Image (cartoon, rainbow, N blue to C red):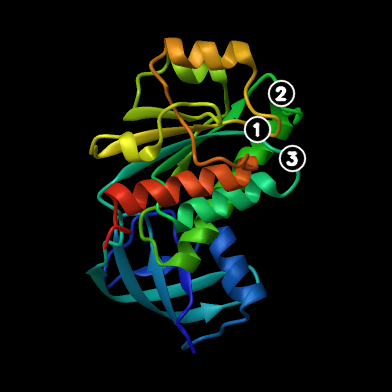
């Protein structure tokens, strides 16, 4: 049986006893139903894994003893920031989960002209928390020991006004360039539109902010497909999927 991997937000030290966070304890105690003596692998985002043993457990509280740690860096040398137009239903959740599995470094949800999802105030706060939990779960499943940040949702205009984290690419079906035309780089930002894509005005605005238009072949891709195809292609070309 595979040892469960659990994210613990606080820092971890070998030889100490740790009270798991509420979310972690709920998963271990209620979902997995693990009890005293069971083994866990913890990670806290520092690229280390920590081997732990449960010393007490209930449905609400789980306490573990940290036995040892080791560095386990599975991160790509390529930094990819995903700026994703917010989509409806489970599509956004799917993009977050799979982009983390593919090695994305950070994510910004975007409100755009054709975004049909209305979120603000407490609803937006809860949605942000849900998105971050999805990212954490994807890290637990995929073996990542670094947790990508889901940054606060922004409008497209607000995002464009920020300092770039890398070369900015906008997926644009009519663009002349493809990923094959890109020069090697260590950091990219991928801009993906929502269902229905970007408006003509948004495309012009993105070009003014030095977003290079990139097309992913002759077919029109759905928003969730476009994001994952672009991340995969960049990892194959410049990252750790290149072999």
How far is disc 3 from disc 2 in space, using C-alphas?
11 Å
182 or 202, which is in the foreground? 182
Residue, x 53% and y 43% (percent of image)?
227
- SS class, disc 2: loop
CB atoms at circles 1 and 2 under 8 Å apart? yes
**Total number of numbered discs in the rendering:** 3
Q: Residues within 10 Å of mark 1 (few under 14, many from 20)?
A: many
In the rendering, which numbered label is found on residue 194? 1
CB atoms at circles 1 and 3 under 8 Å apart? no
211 or 129, which is in the foreground? 211
Percent across and percent down for residue 91 are: 68, 47
Earlier sequence position, callout 1 versus callout 2: 2
Q: In this view, does 27 lie above or below 52?
A: above
Percent across and percent down for residue 16 are: 31, 69
Q: Residues within 10 Å of mark 2 (few under 14, many from 20)?
A: some
How far is disc 1 from disc 2 in space, using C-alphas?
7 Å
Q: Residues within 10 Å of mark 3 (few under 14, many from 20)?
A: some
Position of residue 221 in the picture relative to residue 187 (left or right): right
Residue, x 48% and y 77% (percent of image)?
4
Q: Is residue 216 above or below residue 144?
A: above
- SS class, disc 3: loop
- Rendered-image quadrant of the C terminus: bottom left
Earlier sequence position, callout 3 versus callout 2: 3
Would you name the residue on which mark 2 appears?
Answer: 114
Would you name the residue on which mark 3 appears?
Answer: 88
């Amino acid at each position: 049986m595979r040892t469960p991997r659990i994210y613990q937000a606080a820092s971890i030290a070998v030889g100490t006893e740790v009270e798991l966070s509420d979310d972690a304890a709920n998963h271990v105690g209620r979902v997995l139903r693990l009890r005293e003596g069971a083994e866990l692998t913890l990670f806290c985002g520092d690229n280390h894994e920590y081997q732990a043993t449960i010393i007490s457990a209930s449905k609400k509280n789980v306490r573990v003893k940290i036995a040892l740690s080791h560095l386990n860096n599975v991160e790509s040398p390529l930094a990819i920031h995903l700026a994703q137009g917010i989509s409806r239903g489970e599509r956004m959740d799917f993009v977050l989960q799979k982009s983390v599995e593919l090695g994305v470094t950070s994510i910004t949800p975007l409100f755009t002209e054709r975004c049909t999802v209305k979120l603000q105030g407490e609803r937006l706060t809860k949605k942000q928390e849900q998105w971050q939990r999805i990212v954490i779960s994807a890290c637990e499943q995929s073996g990542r020991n670094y947790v990508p940040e889901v940054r606060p949702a922004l409008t497209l205009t607000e995002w464009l006004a920020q300092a770039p984290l890398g070369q900015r690419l906008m997926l644009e079906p009519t663009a002349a360039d493809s990923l094959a035309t890109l020069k090697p780089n260590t950091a990219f930002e991928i801009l993906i539109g929502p269902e229905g894509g970007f408006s003509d005005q948004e495309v012009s605005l993105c070009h003014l902010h030095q977003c290079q238009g990139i097309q992913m072949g002759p077919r029109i891709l759905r928003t969730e497909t476009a994001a994952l195809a672009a991340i995969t292609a960049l990892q194959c070309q410049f990252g750790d999927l290149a072999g």
